[in-house]
Amino acid sequence: MSLTFALFIDPDGEVDELDTPNSGIEGQHRMVHSHLGKGYSTVGLGRFVLHCTNAPFPQQVNIPAQQMWKDLSGGSLPPVFRGPVVVTGRRRPDGSYPQLPADQLDRLHRSIGAVPWTEPKQPVISAAQDKGTRGEQCDAVAVHTDHATGVWAFVVCDGVEDHVEARWAAHHLAQRIAIVAAETGDPEAAVNAARQDLPTWRLHFCSETKPTATVAAAVWHPRRGEITVAWAGNVRVYAMGATGLVEQLTVDHTVAEFKESRNAPVQSGDGDRLLAHVGEGPVEVLRVYREWVSRLLLCTDGAYGPVERRPRGGVANTLALMPPKEAAGALVVEGVRAAVERSEDEWGEADAGNATALVVDLSML
């Protein structure tokens, strides 16, 4: 008679009971590995453990496993499980897992689909980054909400140049701008506040350079009918409407954009020559009606640049066609891949900058 070792839950709703392997602890771990792949992670939930993949973004969200979590936890918001999930008993000190008794197994079966899935009453947010071929990841993402007012702030910064102090600056500025933007509801004021603080921060944390970053910040107030965007440099903001139409809201502060606006010839490298960043230059602001915006995308040039240079596809396709939790990762992977392919074709070697994307889905709110 076979004994039940674990419950396997597939994203498409298939549920299987896994028999206890005969080869002891090693066999148990090998069985979990065979169902989830390399590098899976575990999350404890009462007397159970949920083993889930650390798979990349294309994995389907496992709604049945999230329903089970919600039922077993008394209604708390579940983690986002992607791909299959294996449920076992709590791990023993020796590393083995106990068999699942009949009553526990019945409870697990009943909990799948027992609680209707409800969308969270907050934006669905995803972010992704890839260092590309650079030495440092000098992009940074920050999201902050003011619990007193309900204001949300979303920020992406792109550190100028490729060194550790640029990385520090991007992370500092992103966090600083996000907090101030959420507290004040004013992204332009937040960027200017960071600009005023930047010399003092450099004095304390930087010894070799004077790092800065380009920035885009978006603020959403649930009780207001508009979203406010502020930016300096070439971090872009896109908005998708309910019909799937995608519009680029920002205009790059670069020499290339300046020349194109005046029908002047653009030279190689003009796209990297900045006319604004957090340290200096104009900070532009725009407002867009909230009811028009289904989804926002904030991304650095390493993500949008290579994709937009392709003859087909582009940012619009990724943002409109991918689920919100997958769109950021898809764009970053596509951007780095496109940059590597282009550089290998033109120069014979792989070259790709930092790529970062932040997707904010407001469609269910």
Image (spheres, grey):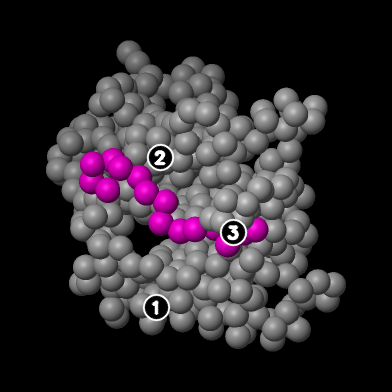
Residue 318 in the image: x percent, y percent? 42, 37
Q: Which residue is mark 2?
A: 316
Residue 285 in the image: x percent, y percent? 42, 71
> Toward which corner of the image does residue 227 lie, by quadrant?
bottom left
**Residue 186, disc:** 1
Magenta stretch, overall SS: loop
Is residue 245 found inside the magenta-colored segment of the image? yes
Q: Please state which of the two labelled residues, at mark 3 or mark 1, is closer to the viewer.
A: 3
Q: Earlier in the sequence, mark 2 or mark 1?
A: 1
Disc 3 marks which amino acid?
Answer: Phe
- Density class for disc 3 (Cα within 10 Å; few <14, some 14-19, many ≥20) is some
Q: Earlier in the sequence, mark 3 or mark 1?
A: 1
| Front residue (pair 60, 113) | 60
Secondary structure at numbered mark 2: helix
Asked if residue 75 lies left or right of residue 97, the reply is: left
Disc 2 marks which amino acid?
Answer: Ala
| Front residue (pair 12, 4) | 12
| Quadrant in the picture for the C terminus | bottom left
Q: Which residues are magenta?
A: 241-255
Q: CA distance from mark 2 to mark 1?
A: 27 Å
Residue 254 lies, with reference to residue 100, above or below; the image says below
Asked if residue 163 lies left or right of residue 259, the reply is: right
- Density class for disc 1 (Cα within 10 Å; few <14, some 14-19, many ≥20) is many
**Residue 137, disc:** none
Q: Residue at x 57, y 36 (%)?
A: 309
Q: Which residue is mark 3?
A: 258
Residue 155 in the image: x percent, y percent? 48, 64
Residue 187 in the image: x percent, y percent? 43, 74
Q: In this view of the protein, can residue 28 be seen by the observer?
A: no
Secondary structure at numbered mark 3: helix
Residue 203 lies, with reference to residue 70, above or below; the image says below
